Each structure stands twice: as C-alpha cells, then as structure tokens.
Image: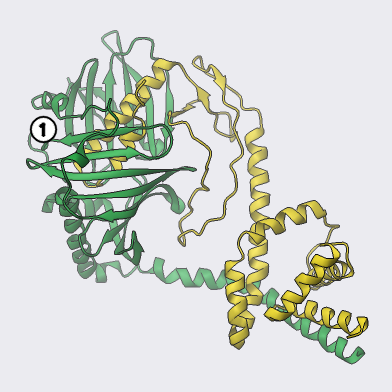
Chain colours: A yellow, B green
Amino acid sequence: MSHGSHQQRLNESLSALMDGEANELEIQRLLKESDANGASDGELGHRWSRYQLAASVMRGEKVAPVDMGLAASISAAIADEPSLESAQQASANDAGNGVASSRWWRPLSRGAVAATVAFAAILGVQQMQAPQVQGDLVAEVEAPQPQPVTTSPQPSRFLTPTLNTRAVSTAPQLVPEQRVGPAPQVQVVPTPELMRHLNRVMVEHSEQAARIGSQGMVPHARATYGERPSE
Amino acid sequence: MTMAKLIFLTLRKANSSLLAFLLFASPLAFAQGSAPADNQEIPQDARDATASEATRVLLARLAQAVANLEYRGLVTFEHVGSMETLEVVHGIRDGEQVERIRYLTGSPREKVTRSGDDQCRPSGSVFPRSGLLSAAGLQNVQSNYAFLIRGEERVADREAIVLEARPRDLHRFGMVISVDKETGLPLKSMLIAPAGRVLERFQFVELDLTPVTDDELKPQTPSTEPTTGAEAAKCANVESRWRLGWAPSGFKPVAVQALSDGQMLVFSDGLSTFTVFVQQLPEMNYKGRAVRGATVAYMDHIDVNGARYTVTVVGEIPDNTAQLVAKAVTEAN
C-alpha cells in the first residue's frame, strides 16, 4: 500500500467521521494514526481542525482561534460520557435512521458540555464578588467555593441541583434579612448560641413532622442530619 | 477526484443545513412534546372523578404502608448540592413505630425514635396520627394540592407509580413520590420548589421487607439514646399561649408543646409541616432566615408587656411564607 493511498483512505475516513458515518474500522484507523503522529500535531489533526472550522462556518457560527488547552479540557469532559454516542454509533451501522440520529446528537451534547463550562464560570464569578456584610452577629464570611460541575442524567422537567462531593457542613446557613440588591446571598458564621438554637428548632421541627407521619422516613432523615455526633 | 470532492462538499453542506434545522426545530419539538402534559390540567374537571379516586386509593395505601410496614434499607438523601447515604430501619413494637436512622457518610450520626401515638394533638384536631389516613385529612390534602399520576418507574429494583402533588398556591412546595406498587411504601420522594427545582431527594437504593429483629432497632453507636415520647407526653393538655393572626390556607394546628423556655406550635396541611417556636431567649436578636437542606428557619421577635420573645418559624415551606407566618404571631389574649 503506497503512502498516497493510505493518506487518501485516512482522509475519506475523516470525512466520514465528520458526517457521523464512519464505521468501527475507520474510527480505529483514525485513532491509530492520530496516536502515532501525536494528537494535534500531525497532518490528520490539522485536517480535522480545518474540517471542523469549515463546518462551523457553514453552520453560520462565529469562529475564533481555538485555545488548544481549553479544547483539550472540553474534549476530556466529552470523553467521560461516550456511552450515548457510541451506542448510537453502533446502531448507526445497523439502520439508516440511526445514522441520522447520531449526527444530531453529537453537536447537541458538545454544545451542552460547553454551555456547562461557561455556566460554571459565570457562577464562579458571581460568587466571588465581595458580599456586603451587615448585621451585628456577623463574625466572618465563609469564602464561597465554586460548585464543581457534574453531568448526571436528570429526570425531565425537574432541575436537580448539581451534586457536591466535598464534605458539607451540616450547620444551618444564615441569610440575614437585609440583603444588598441582587447581590449573591451571603453565608455568615454566627454565634454558637444562635447556631445551637437553629439546630435545635430544626431538629425539633423534624421530629414533630415525623409524628404527623405522611412523609415516612424523610423527616427522620432530616432530624438525624443535624444530630450532633457524640463529643 | 474534483468531482468527488464537490459531491462530498455538497453532501456535507446538505448535512449541515439539515443539522441546523434540526437544532432549531428540536427545542420546539420538545416544547410541543411537553405541552400535552400541561394541558391535561384544563379538562381536569372531567377527569377529576376517576383521577382523584385513583390518587385517593394510592394515598391511603401510602399512609397505611408508612405506618404499618416493617422494613430496612439503604437510602440516598440529597439536598442542595450534597448527597449522603444512610441506613434506615422501621419496626413496629407494641403498636408503636420505632425508627432507626444511621448516616453512612459524613460525621457519624444515628438516631432511634420511638414515636408514641399522637400525644400532642390539641383536642378536636382534624388530623389523626397520619393526616392521610382519615377521609377528612385526605380531602384537606386534596384541596391544597392537585394530584397527578405521572407514570411509572423502577426504584430500588421495584416497580413504582410516580405521583405528583402540585401545590394549589405559593405557600407550599410540591412533591413527587414514587409509590411501591406492591406495598404502597414511598420508594423515592422529591420536594419541588416552583419552576421544577428539586430541593431534596430521598431515595431507596435497597429495600428489604422481611420482619425487623430487635437487634436491628438498637443503636450501633454506643452513645445514641433512644428518643422517646417522654418529653412529648407532657404536652397533652397544653393550651397555646400564642396564635397566628394569619396562616396559609389549609394549614391547621396539629400539636402544641411546652418547651423549657417557651412553646412550640405545629401546623400541617397534610403533607407539608411548619413549626412555630416562641421562646424567651436572652441575647438572641437575630432577624432573618437560615437554611439547611430543604428546611428554612425564619427568626423574628415580638414584644409583649415589655418582654421580648424570639419567634422562629421552621419548615419545608417557601421563605416568604415562613416570614409572613413569623410576623403573624400574636398573643392569644
């Protein structure tokens, strides 16, 4: 096999991949080639970039020079969730309909990941704005931490908050009444007496709610949540 | 070769425009897809008779299961950005419910509760122990929430019916409860704020319905003392010193209890509950709210005959409602 025809076959595979029509063999070939040449340095990488750019222009998207670091981090995020795509890719080989569906899903999921990243960035900025602290009881401001972004399947039409895996304090969080305009809500660390009071009333309330009994174990879980571990 | 390339290009262009169209069209398609679900509310009256009968049966089964079944299981409990896992055991001993809950994540917390039967009800309350067990309680719940059966799902390897309680006003949160088909036990429950925001999710991962042994109801952490109804017992004949000038519709007083430094009054609409604490707490001048998970506490104070009382309204209710309730506390002459 001459070098020329090998390159040509690669280009055809790349075109097919662009259109979501690459078969398993072609993808394997492309991956192997890109591994051999180093991800974005080789001829294949450049060609892939050009194809993407051309596709973007045709879609009427605004195009800016891509920061390869950012692109790498986004593609890493995409790599974490390949199941849907690859499942559809597989079905694409079987049925004509599958080909079409795999094609629309790709840009959607990619856009979703990018949007999530952007959203996290905005959130981080908002939280970092120095909050105006008021009230006599304010001792110190807890530095807010940007929420880590997770991708989890969510039930349709309910917005589940993103999950946080870091250890979270079980203490109630105070929100003083005087709030400053639309500024982010301020977390303050109040006096120990106030925290004890709040914890006590929340636990007592949950125990009462458990007695009413229509919610099963949930109020018990809430009451136990604030239980102080033995000191 | 050039010809082939041209065809390639046109094909790709066709693909791209198709794609662009689909991108535009798909949100519309989704919107249309979800529209019929919302429109179901319009001919609600027509379907009400059968739908409400079905939910009535489901709610009654749920109330029975919650009070009478013995089970143990593993549960995930999530709220606003955090998730914990816990072990729950529910047994019946001498006609009383005994619950043991132990957190498997975070700081070790465990609680054993023995809830005696309805000590703290003011006489004439419409609520028995479970608001859903009586016809009156059920009717009250249905006047505060619209119930919709949203379909089926599988939770903890069991088939469940998904029931949504949609609040009829802004003073309470909605709930989505997945009820076990076989037993009526809630396998998953979510607390829903307006715009579909999930505040809290409690969900079984594993459920075992075989009878619970005495050992399983004993605390595993040595220092855990069972919480008995002992403190609650003295509330039986407490007259409330306070009353609410205003309460959101449907919330009725279900309990009054004396505290060492004041009183607490419990209100429920059959699903949601809030508690009003009126206490003499020196040096407690904080005014504002605090949140933990789905629970909000709003603090304020009132002055009666020169004495200052701290008012704290605690519940799984919207912030504004808690604030309104706190401001409505007055002395019951």
Would you say residue B128 is visible in this rendering?
no
Determine the residue positioned at 48% across, 51% down: A160
Kind of residue at badge 1: Gln
Give left or right: position of B45 versus B19.
left
Residue density around tag 1, few if under 14, some if 14–19, many if 20 or more, within 10 Å: many
Identify the residue position indicated by label 1 in the image: B119
Give left or right: position of B16 versus B242.
right
Q: Which residue occupies the foreground of this view, B22 or B61? A: B61
Give the percent coordinates (x, y) of residue A72.
Answer: 76, 55
Residue B31 position (above or below residue A12): above
Determine the residue positioned at 68% across, 50% down: A118
Mark 1 belongs to chain: B
Most extreme residue toward the top is B306
Residue B316 image-quadrant placement: top left
Would you say residue A156 is visible in this rendering?
yes
Give the percent coordinates (x, y) of residue B278.
Answer: 27, 21
Q: Which residue occupies the foreground of this view, A44 or A182? A: A44
